[in-house]
Image: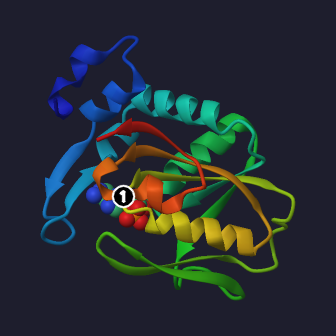
Amino acid sequence: MGVSGVKSLRGSAPVADLIAALTRDVADFPTPGIQFKDLTPLFADRQAMTAVTDALADVVSGADLVAGIDARGFLVAAAVAARLGTGVLAIRKSGKLPPPVLSEAYEREYGPATVEIPAGTIELRRRNVVIIDDVLATGGTLGAACRLLERGGANVITAAVVMELTALGGREAIAPLPVHSLSRT
Ligand code: AMP
């Protein structure tokens, strides 16, 4: 449908329709062969952002800490945490956090990467944590984030994303961790 078709969806549009209408597909970004899902128009839209936040807060309501993945996951995780009344934890790309950190390396759709959380400064033991990101592709990032949090002692109860790219097998890759996706393409 594209961003220009969203006006016809106002009112009680299902959240998946709003997401589809406000996502921009960008071919060959950041590398050739990748179809990048740009959710910037979605995040900037008051109705859609509210609907996404409400829908994610519904499916992760058992959490007492919401972890968001660098960087677009931060936008959604912070909004959901505020809605639930929980804290929020930023899972950072390597080199962003001061030491000491816990690190986990992984492969993603367009190359190797590392995610990090603070080591020892946040009590994760016995906490029910959910991990939130914008897009689930191969599942490498969510899988690494889950391993990282579990190494820190957290009980990771679920993952939740705005959009799942089903052909890339991320859901299967991160099993048995359940993942809720608000839209699938
Ligand atoms: P993956 O680890 O392969 O599941 O990739 C997920 C992470 O990379 C998320 O943080 C996404 O923001 C980003 N990402 C991967 N593929 C895409 C894509 N096609 N469009 C937008 N973001 C993507």
Residue at (53% x, 85% y) in the render: 95
Mark 1 Cβ and ligand 1 under 8 Å apart: yes
Task: Judge from the rendering whether residue 84 lies leftward or rightward of residue 162; answer left or right.
Answer: right
Neighbour class for label 1 at 10 Å: few (<14), some, many (≥20)?
A: many
The colour scheme used to paint the residues is rainbow
Ligand 1 appears in which quadrant? bottom left
Kindly indicate the quadrant of the structure image that contains residue 139. Answer: bottom left
- Count the marks: how many? 1
Q: Is residue 123 visible?
A: yes
Nearer to the camera, 131 or 22: 131
Image location of residue 164, percent across then percent down: 38, 47
Residue at (37% x, 11% y) in the render: 11
Task: Judge from the rendering whether residue 184 lies leftward or rightward of residue 181; answer left or right.
Answer: left
The quarter of the image holding the N terminus is top left
**Residue that label 1 marks:** 137
The quarter of the image holding the C terminus is top left
Image location of residue 55, percent across then percent down: 54, 30
Residue at (20% x, 33% y) in the render: 3
Kindly indicate the quadrant of the structure image that contains residue 131. Answer: bottom right
Looking at the image, residue 41 lies above or below residue 30: above
Amino acid type, label 1: Ala
Image location of residue 170, percent across then percent down: 42, 57
Which SS class for mark 1? Answer: loop
Work out which residue is located at the far bottom of the displayed protein and give it. 99
Q: Is residue 70 visible?
A: no
Image location of residue 122, percent across then percent down: 80, 69
Task: Judge from the rendering whether residue 48 lies leftward or rightward of residue 92; answer left or right.
Answer: left
Task: Judge from the rendering whether residue 13 lies leftward or rightward of residue 35; answer left or right.
Answer: right
Nearer to the camera, 57 or 151: 151
Residue at (38% x, 36% y) in the render: 183
Looking at the image, residue 149 lies above or below residue 64: below
